[in-house]
Image (cartoon, rainbow, N blue to C red):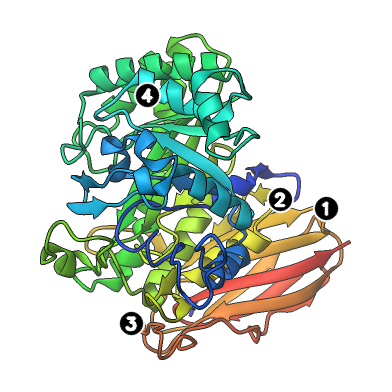
Amino acid sequence: MEKAKMTVDKDFTIGEVDKRLYGSFIEHLGRAVYGGIYEPGHASANEQGFRTDVLEMVKELHVPIVRYPGGNFVSGYNWEDSVGPVSERKRRLDLAWRTIETNEFGFNEFVDWAKQANSEVMMAVNLGTRGADAARNIVEYSNHPEGSYYSDLRIKHGYKQPHGIKTWCLGNEMDGPWQIGHKTAEEYGRTAVEAAKVMKWTDPTIELVACGSSNLGMPSFPDWEATVLDHTYDHVEYLSLHQYYGNPEDDTPTFLARSLEMDRFIDTVKATCDYIKAKKRSKKTMYLSFDEWNVWYHSHENDSKMDAWQIAPPQLEDIYNHEDALLVGCMLISMLKHADRVKMACLAQLVNVIAPIMTETGGASWRQTIFYPFMHASVYGRGTALVPLIQSPKYDTKEITDVPYLEGIAVHNEEQGEVTVFAVNRHLQESLPLEVDLRSFGKCTLIEHIVLEADDLKAVNTAAQPNNVVPHNRGGAVVSDTLITASLAKASWNVIRLKVQ
């Protein structure tokens, strides 16, 4: 097969990688909370009912921020139901997912859990059934020190110190007809800006995320973004993006090329933000929060048959295979290629619900295939993303043309004296010879070459076989001064770690 080549130079930078690029998401949906992060009575549960086996896996991922409590759930969420004595909390119908929410696990419990997971909280407010008043009240409850009704209520609930949550989402997917309280762009823009104003008057130190389109296929995209930003540009710091991909037609070459669509999605949103910046004669740059992304399609059929009004049923429990892990790797590379503007992202979700971590209620926990590229990027993808000049053989699919077999990026961690190359070989039958030219770095030495590969693209990990698809460090890359040569196995995710002078 024709050789692929990547050239990187430490002076040709994309931008600093914000650690929050490796965030995740916990929604009150399915078994994400109940039976996932929280299960009193489980053998591993601590005194607060948090599963410590899950906490340890979350810590392996080094997740810096977790979005909560939704998702579609938040558009019908009364935050007051989730605080105070558990015995006094109300059970509610969750209309978003047609289940019963007991509120046994609530806002303060999540803050406690996030601290134990070494994560910050990205809190979403309800702009579906509620608005500016409830939004300012939860900020007061969370962040105001004392001496007001809601801050004193927090203290009464056992939390003397403010939670100090800095990142807040102004609703969720408000362009979607499926959303409780769905709004037009004009309606949402007006609601969001008024909520933003009072939230920041309550705590001027917070940062806010406005809702972008629910996905790139929405009929209103990108007009939605332009209209919303017309209202909110001066009051928010981020605009959100959401995107999921699937392979229901079993067309793997097209599936693995979907990250090119993700690139175009990000580029279009950036351009729309910059149009509003120019229109407003603003000096402020709008950053992006890709706060929902993943593969999602395996569970659709089962979910369509689920009875309504259960408590924590097994919803959206995708079992991920090897090809899913490859696309997750490509999507991570896509976000790194836009590290100058994509500053936060949330793999949706974290446990059981379209997640890298799975559990049995009352039983075992294990790592799905997608756990590994996400972990590798989170642990080794800190520093400065470098412009990748790539030459690669290409292929065409019935939907997408000129797809490079090599998807790649390099990240320079100057503090650690390391460069990490992340690379996916999209070819399903052949290995890909790769040459990486690090001409500006001086003499480099190989730390390791990690590979995630599987003979069967549909191979999965299960409770019975948790190590069926796991990475190894026998990749075989060779370094000579500033030149790396490697053979990337067919359909593989690769992490080549280098020590630099």
Q: Which mark is residue 320?
A: none
Q: Can you identify the residue that label 1 sits on?
A: 415
Measured in 3D between alpha carbons, the distance from the residue under mark 4 to the one under mark 3, in whole angstroms, is 46 Å
Q: Which mark is residue 458?
A: 3
Label 4 or label 3, whichever comes before in sequence order: 4
Residue depicted at x 52% and y 70%: 45
Pick the residue in front: 174 or 36. 36
Measured in 3D between alpha carbons, the distance from the residue under mark 1 to the one under mark 2, in whole angstroms, is 8 Å
**Residue 248, visible in the rendered structure:** yes
Q: Secondary structure at mark 2?
A: loop
Measured in 3D between alpha carbons, the distance from the residue under mark 1 to the one under mark 3, in whole angstroms, is 39 Å
Residue type at tag 2: Gly
Q: Secondary structure at mark 3?
A: loop
Check contact, mark 4 vs mark 2: CB within 8 A: no
How far across and down, in percent of the image, does residue 43 sit? 50, 78
Residue type at tag 4: Ala
Q: Can you identify the residue that label 2 sits on?
A: 383
Pick the residue in front: 150 or 78. 150
Residue type at tag 1: Glu
Q: Which label lies toward us, 4 or 1? A: 4
Label 4 or label 1, whichever comes before in sequence order: 4
Measured along the vertical axis of the image, is residue 390 above or below residue 393? Answer: above
